[in-house]
Amino acid sequence: KLIHHRKETVARKGQNPSQQKGGHSSGSTENPPDAPEGMSKITPDPIPSLPDTASPDSNIYQVLTQHRRATPPAPEKLRDLHSISSTLQEMADITPRTVSTVSSTSTASLDTLYTGSSNSPEPQQSTATSSPSETPPPLPSRSTFTAPRYPTSIPLQADTSPVLSAQALGPSNQLQEATDNDLEVGSGLPRTPKEEAASPSESEAQQGKLAVSVPKTIGAELIELVRKNTNLSYELSRVAIGVTVGHIQSSVPAVMDVMEQILLSLVESKDLSAALPRGQVCQDEQRLEVIFTDLARHKNDSQQRSWALHEDESIISCYLEELLGILTDADPEVCKRMTKRNSFEPILSLIAYYQMEHRVTLRLFLLKCFGAMCNLDAAIISTLANSVLPMELARDMQADTKEHQKLCYSALLLTMIFSMGEPLPYHHYEHLNSTFIQFLLDVIEEGLSSDSTEQLPDLFTNVLLSFNLHILDDPVNIFKHQPQPPHSVVKFLQDVFADKDTARIFYRTDLMVMIDIIVRQISDLSPGEKIRMEYLSLMHAIMRSTDYICHQHRLPDLQVTFQRILAEEENDQSCQMDKLIIQEIYKEFPDFALENEL
């Protein structure tokens, strides 16, 4: 038996020289001194199928635990091993190549484990053990291992089932399936009452709309933020927010209702300070409070010193410039409330400061501020008209004609103050007298050397027209409850043609042009309009103070218009006054009346 076993060992060594060289031999040989020549003691691995190969008492057999190389099995077990090997070979062919690569086990490695080398001249014999459970672990492949993009579960042994191979081929699909399953499981869980209350209803979710409560102060808060951070005016801030919110509303249907509420809040926030949340004050109101307080303090210092301290000019200029910007750009309601507080105390303080301040730069700023205040409310104009400001402006305009810019702003401010036709206090006529009117007429006729742009004649004409509104009572002003004054130009022309001496100022051609305008206005105006009565009174004055009876310009058109007005069925006071004026014209000039009207 020992000789036969040695022959098989020599044959096996000849078949696998590379394994012998790498230390994968199944035993080692030695030449003991008592052995015959050509013989050597063999130390093979313990073979479970050949128990009588080595006796328990011999110590010359050594087990190499480092290499688990099995000896050929007994001949009666070869059939079972071949059947197992063929079955594994078929299952390995079904498994895709990627699985064999990932698991570092190929079909070639399986053949190596269970069959002998193909270089052997003898029939191939299996080198595996008799039990599949004792199969050694696969040898690592030398091919480069590429880690998959997603972590996958790789079995230690090659799994050759088609289902697992498909999962290994598609890791992303496997993760997607797991995610979808998790979502489906989560969606099936019962929700708590709080979650049901917090989530929108199904109809709202389908429409893409969310029920959101928008604060009513959101419009005012947005205006305040935009104005504070961009220095835009109040109106431009409203426009900017409206355009932005409107574009979002049309572009994002899901927030359409929310944007609609913001737009409504933007429209309803008329008073910025009152529309802001309680406790929040707008920046413009805070700055007006500071400016009015500091300017009043500077005014009191000037009264105590009785002389101008030029070091404070830059500070006061900064205050007045900021005040002008706020009065022009801020919310008018905020400015109106701040200027009218304590019976117009801030305005009266600035008027007193203007009266004692003689520096041109500061007076220019004050004139501009007064003009901006006139645009806020009619009550502010009444306060200015009843103060000493009109007398101071009239005196300064006549005294200092070299400062062209100050003269222009003074004339413009006087026009604003007189434009409402409000009667002036009696002591105002000490300065607003015939000397002042003559000064205005001289500048209108001849101009001033300092007026290189020729702006003063037009500005002074406006002063004269506005000042004339309260000199004479309008004889046809029936509606006392109406605050609107008569048209200043018509009223002025009525006063001019009230006397023949002043009526001679107009040339005949200019007079005919004026009559054309009057006839067109009387024909176009509707019954009941007050301005038609004023044009009829003007035409009556022209007939009496000029030679109209000689040229009778547009008389046929006037006769037709007069006849239509007399035939009107309206019985209100305005129409009755129109008919009364026409009847007075026919009484004074009977030749102008038609035969059926006599």
Image (spheres, rainbow, N blue to C red):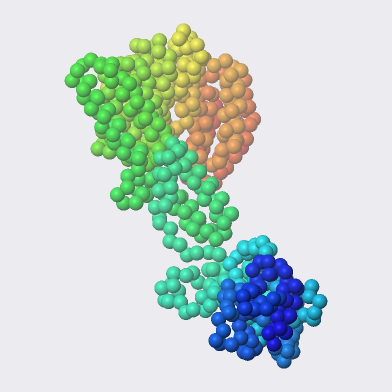
497 in relation to 235, above or below? above
568 on left or right of 85: left
* Foreground pick, 483 / 457: 457
Residue found at x 60% / y 65%: 150
Is residue 17 toward the left or the right of residue 488 in the image? Answer: right
**In screen coordinates, is 492 left or right of 25?**
left
Q: Is residue 84 visible?
A: no
Q: Position of residue 366 (x, y in %)?
A: 35, 24
Up/down of 100 relative to 124, above or below: above
Q: Quadrant of residue 351?
A: top left
Of all residues shown, which one is farthest toward the right?
121
Residue 83 versus residue 357: which sits nearer the camera? 83
Q: Can you say whether 109 is above or below 537 in the image?
A: below
Q: Of all residues shown, which one is farthest toward the left?
A: 304
Residue 369 lies, with reference to residue 434, above or below; the image says below
Residue drawn where x is 67% and y is 61% of the image:
144
Residue 45 is at least partly visible in this image: yes
Which residue lies at the image location 31% right of the left edge and 51% below the top edge? 278
